Amino acid sequence: MNKILFSSISKKFVLALAGVFLLMFLPVHLIINLMLLKSDPEPFNKAAHFMATFPVIKIIEIVLIAAILIHIFYGIFLQIQNWLARPVGYVSGNKSDTSFFSKFMIWTGASVFTFLVIHFFNFYFIRLGLVRGDPEDFYSVVHSLFKIPVYNYIYLVCFTLLGLHLFHAFSSAFQTLGLNHRIWTPVINVIAWIYAIALPLGFAFISITIWQFR
């Protein structure tokens, strides 16, 4: 039983499930963030307050944090397993069949994790009272952060790398979950490209608009 639970395949399956949950959360996050483009802070602050206080959302938040931690843990664990299984580099001329996106998943994932730490520090910790800020006026918090050039540069770089991470994550999650099909797999890959481009562009559009025009 333990061999089944802790096998490489089981870890990839759990990683895929956690990844799918995160993939569903990002569009919701983007829709809420689009309210930041309004001149009136009330809609965004109300949405942020609802997300922070509604019991069902708080349960989902716990699941989300757990999914993030599981995704990170298994991602790192599987990458270390791969490195240990192939300690010597490929002989010159013998190239791996692994895709470009797959090779750099650990590094794009690390950049996303770095951004999440900053994001949690600036927002989640404010709600917990660990960092100075008004938890009832996240609109002003976000706008003040996006006025800082360095914060925007980090934000944009992280979301560019997130796009690379999302493309491989989207397509490989369906493959790991056994949903391959000669007709639907190419469709899923197209959707993965659209998702991986549209989501980061949406977040980048918000930050650049606030930075340069608000």
Image (cartoon, rainbow, N blue to C red):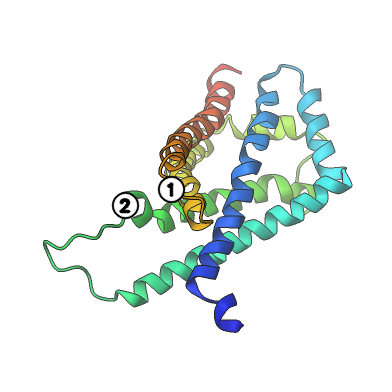
Farthest residue toward the bottom?
Answer: 2
Task: Name the side, left or right, on which 85 lies relative to 205.
Answer: left
Task: Name the side, left or right, on which 48 lies relative to 8.
Answer: right
Residue type of the residue flagged with mark 2: Ser
Question: What SS does tag 2 mark?
Answer: loop
The residue identified by callout 1 is 168
- How many C-alpha atoms fall within 10 Å of the one at disc 1: few (<14), some, or many (≥20)? many
Distance, label 1 to label 2, CA atoms, is 9 Å
Q: Position of residue 150 (x, y in %)?
A: 49, 38
Residue depicted at 59% across the width and 44% down the height: 23
Q: Is residue 69 visible?
A: yes
Q: Quadrant of residue 85?
A: bottom left
The residue identified by callout 2 is 99
Front one among 21 and 136: 21
Is 207 situated above or below 183? above
Residue depicted at 51% across the width and 64% down the height: 12
